[in-house]
Image: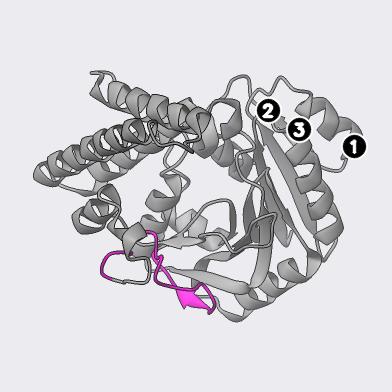
Amino acid sequence: MRASFIVISWNAVHHLRHCLASLTAGIPSDDCEIIVVDNASSDGSREMVTSEFPSARLIRLDDNYGFAKASNAGFRQSSGRYCFLVNSDTTVTSPSLKQMFDYMDEHPEIGLLGPAIIGPDGTKQRSCMEFPSLWNTFCRTFALDSLFPGSKIFGGHLMTYWPHDEIKCVQIINGCFWMLRREAIEQVGLLDETFFIYGEDMDWCKRFHQDGWKVVYFPFAEVVHYGGASSANAPVRFFIEKWKANIIYWNKYHGRFEQILFLLLTYSHHALRLFCYTAALITPRANKHDILFKIKRSAACISALSSPAR
């Protein structure tokens, strides 16, 4: 089989429907399969897949096991020479898929290929990152990357300095739509299930690099990313999981001294934002609803990261 499209979903029935419709219409050949891995949704997602997309294979998990474990369940039942790992809140066109197939066929040294990620309003979203370091974490903590977005020195982690307009070997491809070579997956291994959601993209890209596979950003293919299909169901919880994933990644690849410094920067990040958001409440045109949510989110994150069970 040429390719397996593995779609991960949790309580995102409307996004999932559009995603599967775009894949069904866009797959450029018959020798491809669509596998939907559902993390115990309760919104009718499973029934929708069964009734509206009978050619798709549905894997019904009995609990919400997170992104990495659900993805691995899909990989184990796939048989494509290429595997696409797809978020349920994305859509793609046939020309983009064909260009990705052609480019991967021509470049066997590439293990992971990522397209340009476009928002529903047509704006280009961040598709790549650099591996986290103490310096770029410091820049993010004190918003230096926002103050100097065009600077490679200050905008390193989120690559705010780069316009995402050329084919480029990068360190991290953000994981909402990946094209992977099966040979590379077999060498590198599956996703690390220690990561519940978030962080698995940093970790997997790190392992691809360590095993000598190229990770490439390919802007001539475009995927629309609507964002928040699953995380919108529990935004504070998912925000906390994001920061927990950062700590898991840091503990995996860095020594104890660097781990402590990273944790201090993480607490500083949220403490600084708590102070700034609270101060912003007194401004005349403050969006109090939005600011109060951000205060709640940062406070919950500090509390969760301070827990012995983190």
Which residue type does callout 1 highlight? Glu
Q: Quadrant of the N terminus?
A: bottom right
In the picture, residue 262 is in which quadrant?
A: top left
Residue 11, numbered circle: 2
Quadrant in which residue 31 is drawn? bottom right
Image point 80% across, 40% down: which residue? 17
Between discs 3 and 1, the one toward the N terminus = 3
Single out the mark in the foreground, 3 or 1.
3
Q: Position of residue 113 (x, y in %)?
A: 55, 66
What amino acid is found at the position of numbered circle 3 in the picture?
A: Val
For the residues labelled 3 and 1, the Cα–Cα distance comes to 12 Å
Q: 91 or 150: nearer the eye?
A: 150
Q: Left or right: 77 with respect to 110? A: right
Mark 2 closeness class: few <14, some 14–19, many ≥20 residues within 10 Å: many
Q: How many numbered dots are placed on residues in this image?
A: 3
- Whether residues under marks 2 and 3 lie with C-beta atoms below 8 angstroms apart, the answer is yes
Residue 50 in sight? yes
Q: Position of residue 162 (x, y in %)?
A: 43, 73
Q: Residue at x 51, y 72 (%)?
A: 164
Q: Contact (CB < 8 A) between labels 2 and 1?
A: no
Element carrying mark 2: loop
Residue 78: in sight, yes or no? no
> What's the mark number on residue 52?
1
Q: Specify the color scheme.
A: one colour
Find disc 3 in the rendering and name its residue: 13
Give the extent of the magenta segment: 153-171
Which of these two is toward me, 103 or 147?
147
Residue 15 versus residue 106: which sits nearer the camera?
Answer: 15
Badge 1 local density, few (<14 within 10 Å), some, or many (20+)?
Answer: few
C-alpha distance separating marks 2 and 3: 6 Å
Please tell me whether residue 177 is drawn above or below residue 247 in the rendered image: below
